[in-house]
Image (spheres, grey):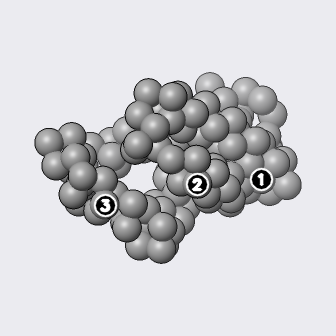
Amino acid sequence: MDIKKIGIAGLIGFVVHAVFGAVSFPFFYETHLTTLAGKFPEVVQFPPNMAVAALGGIMYVFVMAIIYDKMGVDSVEGGAITGAWFGAAKWTFINTQFMALMPNVFEAKFVVIDILISTVMYAVAGAAMGWALNRFK
Protein backbone atom coordinates (compact mmCIF):
# COMPACT_ATOMS: atom_id res chain seq x y z
CA MET A 1 0.00 0.00 0.00
CA ASP A 2 1.34 3.40 -1.02
CA ILE A 3 0.97 5.56 2.10
CA LYS A 4 1.67 8.78 0.18
CA LYS A 5 -1.06 7.99 -2.39
CA ILE A 6 -3.60 7.06 0.29
CA GLY A 7 -2.61 10.06 2.40
CA ILE A 8 -3.05 12.57 -0.41
CA ALA A 9 -6.30 11.02 -1.66
CA GLY A 10 -7.61 10.86 1.91
CA LEU A 11 -6.66 14.45 2.63
CA ILE A 12 -8.34 15.66 -0.56
CA GLY A 13 -11.44 13.60 0.25
CA PHE A 14 -11.56 15.01 3.79
CA VAL A 15 -11.28 18.60 2.56
CA VAL A 16 -14.06 18.08 0.00
CA HIS A 17 -16.31 16.48 2.64
CA ALA A 18 -15.57 19.32 5.08
CA VAL A 19 -16.31 22.05 2.54
CA PHE A 20 -19.46 20.33 1.28
CA GLY A 21 -20.59 19.78 4.87
CA ALA A 22 -19.92 23.40 5.81
CA VAL A 23 -22.02 24.55 2.87
CA SER A 24 -24.92 22.10 3.37
CA PHE A 25 -25.06 22.36 7.18
CA PRO A 26 -26.76 25.76 7.50
CA PHE A 27 -29.24 24.99 4.72
CA PHE A 28 -30.55 21.70 6.09
CA TYR A 29 -28.91 20.14 9.12
CA GLU A 30 -28.70 23.16 11.43
CA THR A 31 -32.47 23.65 11.74
CA HIS A 32 -33.05 19.93 12.29
CA LEU A 33 -30.33 19.64 14.94
CA THR A 34 -31.44 22.81 16.72
CA THR A 35 -34.98 21.43 16.92
CA LEU A 36 -33.70 18.09 18.21
CA ALA A 37 -31.55 19.78 20.84
CA GLY A 38 -34.66 21.65 22.02
CA LYS A 39 -36.73 18.44 22.16
CA PHE A 40 -34.01 16.24 23.65
CA PRO A 41 -31.55 18.52 25.50
CA GLU A 42 -30.06 15.65 27.48
CA VAL A 43 -29.40 13.64 24.32
CA VAL A 44 -28.58 16.01 21.46
CA GLN A 45 -25.74 18.51 21.79
CA PHE A 46 -25.90 21.58 19.60
CA PRO A 47 -23.62 22.79 18.30
CA PRO A 48 -21.89 19.45 17.88
CA ASN A 49 -18.37 18.79 19.11
CA MET A 50 -16.53 19.31 15.81
CA ALA A 51 -13.22 17.94 17.13
CA VAL A 52 -14.81 14.54 17.68
CA ALA A 53 -16.63 14.75 14.34
CA ALA A 54 -13.40 15.69 12.52
CA LEU A 55 -11.48 12.82 14.13
CA GLY A 56 -14.11 10.32 12.98
CA GLY A 57 -14.24 11.93 9.54
CA ILE A 58 -10.48 11.77 9.11
CA MET A 59 -10.34 8.10 10.06
CA TYR A 60 -13.28 7.23 7.82
CA VAL A 61 -12.08 9.11 4.74
CA PHE A 62 -8.70 7.38 4.89
CA VAL A 63 -10.50 4.03 5.00
CA MET A 64 -12.47 5.21 1.95
CA ALA A 65 -9.20 6.05 0.16
CA ILE A 66 -7.89 2.54 0.87
CA ILE A 67 -11.14 0.95 -0.33
CA TYR A 68 -11.22 3.08 -3.50
CA ASP A 69 -7.58 2.21 -4.20
CA LYS A 70 -8.22 -1.53 -3.68
CA MET A 71 -11.27 -1.29 -5.96
CA GLY A 72 -9.16 0.28 -8.71
CA VAL A 73 -10.89 3.69 -8.64
CA ASP A 74 -8.50 5.91 -10.59
CA SER A 75 -10.55 8.49 -12.45
CA VAL A 76 -12.90 11.37 -11.76
CA GLU A 77 -15.82 9.47 -13.29
CA GLY A 78 -15.05 6.22 -11.48
CA GLY A 79 -14.64 8.08 -8.21
CA ALA A 80 -17.91 9.95 -8.65
CA ILE A 81 -19.87 6.79 -9.43
CA THR A 82 -18.27 4.82 -6.62
CA GLY A 83 -18.70 7.71 -4.21
CA ALA A 84 -22.36 8.14 -5.10
CA TRP A 85 -23.36 4.52 -4.51
CA PHE A 86 -21.02 4.22 -1.52
CA GLY A 87 -22.53 7.31 0.16
CA ALA A 88 -26.10 6.39 -0.73
CA ALA A 89 -25.67 2.85 0.60
CA LYS A 90 -23.91 3.96 3.79
CA TRP A 91 -26.41 6.64 4.73
CA THR A 92 -29.46 4.59 3.71
CA PHE A 93 -28.28 1.88 6.07
CA ILE A 94 -27.37 4.20 8.95
CA ASN A 95 -30.47 6.40 8.65
CA THR A 96 -32.93 3.52 8.35
CA GLN A 97 -31.39 1.84 11.40
CA PHE A 98 -31.73 5.06 13.38
CA MET A 99 -35.22 5.61 11.95
CA ALA A 100 -36.23 2.16 13.21
CA LEU A 101 -34.89 2.94 16.70
CA MET A 102 -35.87 6.62 16.97
CA PRO A 103 -38.73 7.48 14.59
CA ASN A 104 -39.36 10.82 16.34
CA VAL A 105 -35.77 11.86 15.69
CA PHE A 106 -35.19 10.38 12.23
CA GLU A 107 -38.36 11.17 10.30
CA ALA A 108 -38.77 9.86 6.76
CA LYS A 109 -38.50 13.31 5.17
CA PHE A 110 -35.20 14.00 6.95
CA VAL A 111 -33.83 10.58 5.99
CA VAL A 112 -34.67 10.99 2.29
CA ILE A 113 -33.13 14.47 2.09
CA ASP A 114 -30.05 13.39 4.05
CA ILE A 115 -29.50 10.43 1.72
CA LEU A 116 -29.77 12.70 -1.32
CA ILE A 117 -27.34 15.26 0.12
CA SER A 118 -24.95 12.49 1.18
CA THR A 119 -25.08 10.87 -2.25
CA VAL A 120 -24.03 14.12 -3.91
CA MET A 121 -21.39 14.82 -1.24
CA TYR A 122 -19.84 11.39 -1.66
CA ALA A 123 -19.96 11.67 -5.46
CA VAL A 124 -18.05 14.96 -5.37
CA ALA A 125 -15.55 13.66 -2.81
CA GLY A 126 -15.22 10.40 -4.74
CA ALA A 127 -14.49 12.30 -7.94
CA ALA A 128 -11.76 14.27 -6.16
CA MET A 129 -10.31 11.10 -4.64
CA GLY A 130 -10.45 9.30 -8.01
CA TRP A 131 -8.58 12.22 -9.54
CA ALA A 132 -5.95 12.07 -6.78
CA LEU A 133 -5.55 8.28 -7.10
CA ASN A 134 -5.10 8.74 -10.86
CA ARG A 135 -2.05 10.97 -10.23
CA PHE A 136 -0.20 7.91 -8.88
CA LYS A 137 -0.75 5.56 -11.83
**Which residue is more in the foreground, 24 or 109?**
109
In three-dimensional space, the C-alpha distance between marks 3 and 2, rounded to whole angstroms, equals 15 Å
The numbered disc on residue 35 is 3
- Near mark 3 (Cα within 10 A), the count class, few <14, some 14-19 or many ≥20, is some
Question: Image point 85% across, 55% down: which residue?
Answer: 77
In three-dimensional space, the C-alpha distance between marks 2 and 1, rounded to whole angstroms, equals 25 Å
- Rendering coords of residue 12 (x, y %): 55, 56
Specify the quadrant that holds the N terminus: top right
- Rendering coords of residue 10 (x, y %): 54, 45
Q: Nearer the viewer, mark 3 or mark 1?
A: 3
In the rendered view, would you say 14 is above or below 61? below
**Is 2 displayed left or right of 23 in the figure?**
right
Q: Which residue is mark 1?
A: 80
Question: Image point 34% across, 48% down: which residue?
Answer: 54
**Which residue is more in the foreground, 89 or 107?**
107
**Amino acid identity at mark 1:** Ala
- Quick one: SS at disc 2? helix
- Near mark 1 (Cα within 10 A), the count class, few <14, some 14-19 or many ≥20, is many
- State whether residue 104 appears in this view: yes
Task: Give the mark nearer the N terminus: 3 vs 1.
Answer: 3
Q: Which residue is mark 2?
A: 109
